[in-house]
Amino acid sequence: MSGSVSPLAPKSFASMPAVRGVRMATASAGIKYKNRTDVLMMVFDKPAAVAGVFTRSKCPSAPVDFCRANLPHGTARAVVVNSGNANAFTGIKGREATALTAKSAAAAVGCSEREIYLASTGVIGEPLDATKFSGVLDTLHADATGDFWFEAAKAIMTTDTYPKVATRSAEIDGVGVSINGIAKGAGMIAPDMATMLSFVVTDADIAPAALQAMLSAGVDPTFNSMTVDSDTSTSDTLMLFATGAAAEDGQLRVEAADDPRLGSFRAALNDLLRDLALQVVRDGEGATKMLEITVTGAESDAAAKKIALSIANSPLVKTAAAGEDANWGRIVMAVGKSGEMADRDRLAIWFGDVRVAVNGERDAGYSEQAASDVMKNQDIPVKVEIGLGNGKATVWTCDLTKEYVAINGDYRS
């Protein structure tokens, strides 16, 4: 965590209510950081339904492998998360660390190791000494409390400058339900199926298959549409848990994702995922600007997204944003290299409401001053019309500053 909070941080944090059926506690195990919490335990007093999406990296961390193996069982009793060490590229030692953590957590909670979920974030390639925190899991289990979301979000931070929290309410069959979520992430963010780490809990009574379908669909326009630096983490994990406590209020269990009773819940979940995803972009390492890049008129939605990500991941586009330079030529460059169909002579580009290019050349009515004024804002909308079809997509990114290089130039030391 750097000394100064991102200028794009929220001006105030959501007030996080307790969600029935889940308790949390944190500890300082000294894994990498001194004098700050680095272990989080979430406890479900009754088995919770679980869904998850993970990195598409071909070099996933040991905890990602562990979670994937447990997910088909569909229930969770506890989650253990550590920051400071990703337990990735750690070979047999990594698997031993997850086995020890799962065994200790299962013993503390009194459940099967198949009902434990693990996540780790931090340095890659350093063995994780799980003995540092395996001994405190009994205490964490005993101390866990429902009113602890903000502290939980703090415990999973690495280079984040602020904790990321969000809450929503919905209703199923007229019964009110809550959804709370936390996330962490500031660098190595170009998720394929998830952000670095995010945990979402609801008190709704929803079966694992329905939860999984909603989560898998919900990540694409949210976590899967943001990029800080084009690098996909080894550890990306997004999990959704349903404690089922709303059954006490008469909510009948929902078995299928296409159940019409899920309309309100699905909208609230998607809104919460988007909120958390944007908080991650706004805490991009060294970021001073957020760019919302919308591509319309592509051959397909998939093509639009690929073009949008080509723009969002371009170091030249991102450094122009950092320098408040309305350099639309770099947008043209990024569209052209994306590999998707584009027609140079149909292209139009906007910075905010200012159209800077149209029909493949500079807009005759374009004002350099008006475009520059847009670039001075913290939030910069960029729109590109391809002019070929109906495909559209929106992605979010941040600028690329000297501070990003400073943070990542000595991350291990």
Image (cartoon, rainbow, N blue to C red):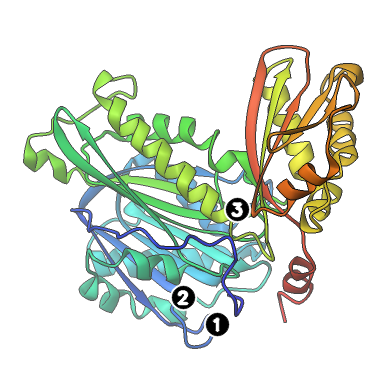
The quarter of the picture where the N terminus appears is bottom right
Q: Relative to 354, is 95 above or below?
A: below
The quarter of the picture where the C terminus appears is bottom right
The amino acid type, in three-letter code, at marker 1 is: Tyr
Q: Is residue 131 left or right of residue 111?
A: right
Q: Earlier in the sequence, mark 1 or mark 2?
A: 1
- Give yes or no for contact between labels 2 and 3 (Cβ–Cβ under 8 Å): no
> Picture coordinates of residue 182 (x, y %)?
41, 57
Q: Residue at x 44, y 59 (%)?
A: 118
The amino acid type, in three-letter code, at marker 2 is: Asp
Q: Quadrant of residue 247?
A: top left
Q: Secondary structure at mark 3?
A: helix
Label drawn at residue 33 = 1
Label drawn at residue 38 = 2
Measured in 3D between alpha carbons, the distance from the residue under mark 2 to the one under mark 3, in whole angstroms, is 22 Å
**Residue 103, visible in the rendered structure:** yes
Q: Secondary structure at mark 1?
A: loop
Q: Quadrant of residue 113?
A: bottom left
* Crowd class of label 3 (few under 14; some 14 to 19; many from 20; radius 10 Å): many
Q: Which residue is mark 3?
A: 281
Measured in 3D between alpha carbons, the distance from the residue under mark 1 to the one under mark 2, in whole angstroms, is 8 Å
Q: Is residue 245 left or right of residue 195?
A: left
Q: Residue at x 22, y 40 (%)?
A: 204
Nearest to the observer: residue 342 or residue 353 = 353
* Crowd class of label 2 (few under 14; some 14 to 19; many from 20; radius 10 Å): many
Q: Residue at x 52, y 54 (%)?
A: 279
Measured in 3D between alpha carbons, the distance from the residue under mark 1 to the one under mark 3, in whole angstroms, is 23 Å
Q: Residue at x 68, y 23 (%)?
A: 302
> Picture coordinates of residue 274 (x, y %)?
48, 42
> Picture coordinates of residue 140 (x, y %)?
29, 74
